[in-house]
Image (tube, rainbow, N blue to C red):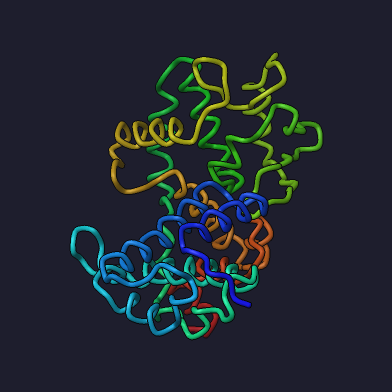
Amino acid sequence: KEVAVQIEDALAAFTTQLEADGRSHHTIAQYQRHVRALATWLHHERHSASLSEVVHEVLARFLASTAARTRPDGAAKKPGSANALRSSLKGFFSYVHRAGYTAQDATRLVRRARAQPPPPRGMSSAAQERLLASMEGEDGLEARRDSVLVRLMLATGLRLSSALALDVSDVELERGELRVRRLKGGGEQIMPLPSAMRERLAAYLGERIPGALFRGCTGRRLGNRQAQRRFAQWLERAGLSGRYSAHSLRHSFAMGLYARTGDVLRVKEALGHRSISSTLVYARCDRERLREAVGA
């Protein structure tokens, strides 16, 4: 027998499940934002928020509405944003169906919007040199820390959250390896360290006590927001403000690795992707490689 459950109550249970599954804070926040957008629309449309009444026809009306198809500034959402909303709703309604709150999955007919994935916004070699040069020209512990952090991300393709979660004990200089304990989706990964990066880390570590590898001025682990602000300041100093984000460093690593090897499977392994589809965005054949391949 179907249980009468309100959408907000189901969202609370879904959030608990996501936390139990080890999903990231950002992922959970996106699910909550998208499901609450649906709940707000239901309220404005004077429609019941009981899950038993949110059937696939109601979801179709929501996805076709202005609330789902436009941004807060009134501009049309890009296909990628539209698909993020659809994916969140599919994840939520799949959960409530499997949990027994509904007799059917209301999103069973929802399809992704057709979209060409945007090219990754990596930094050119010149931009990387400008950024690193601006950092090398500054003295102080924070500037030195930031330089090592940026160089490590460029050398390994680590996400910012993974890099900030590193401890001193995760750096194995003798073996030239890095133990990454925080990955998107969970799990661990052992990553090789280039020799130049090993030398920089050795100098940076010095007599560091155990604990966080990257620390703030208070001695506590450097936070994501603080690191993002610092990176934005370095970009501005290098004359690159507004063009890149910290995630651009990961894109830069992946694009550089693919350019050197032409091996998308090697890039997949280095980035720790579970699916090759996430890596294919980097496998964009440039004009010169195409000319070589066809013997032009």
Residue 128 location in percent, x, y? 43, 43
Q: Nearer the viewer, residue 198 or 52?
A: 52
| Residue at 71% across, 46% down | 191
Res 206 quadrant in image:
top right
**6 on left or right of 94:** left
Above/below status of 224 relative to 156: above
Q: Quadrant of the N terminus?
A: bottom right
**131 on left or right of 77:** right
| Residue at 44% across, 30% down | 226
Res 43 quadrant in image:
bottom left
Q: Nearer the viewer, residue 231 or 131?
A: 231
Q: Nearer the viewer, residue 49 or 192?
A: 49
Residue 251 location in percent, x, y? 49, 54
Please, which residue is most extreme toward the left here? 74
Q: Nearer the viewer, residue 45 or 282?
A: 45
- Total labels drawn: 0
**60 on left or right of 12:** left
Above/below status of 173 relative to 186: above
Residue 162 location in percent, x, y? 60, 42
| Residue at 62% across, 22% down | 204
Residue 246 location in percent, x, y? 45, 43
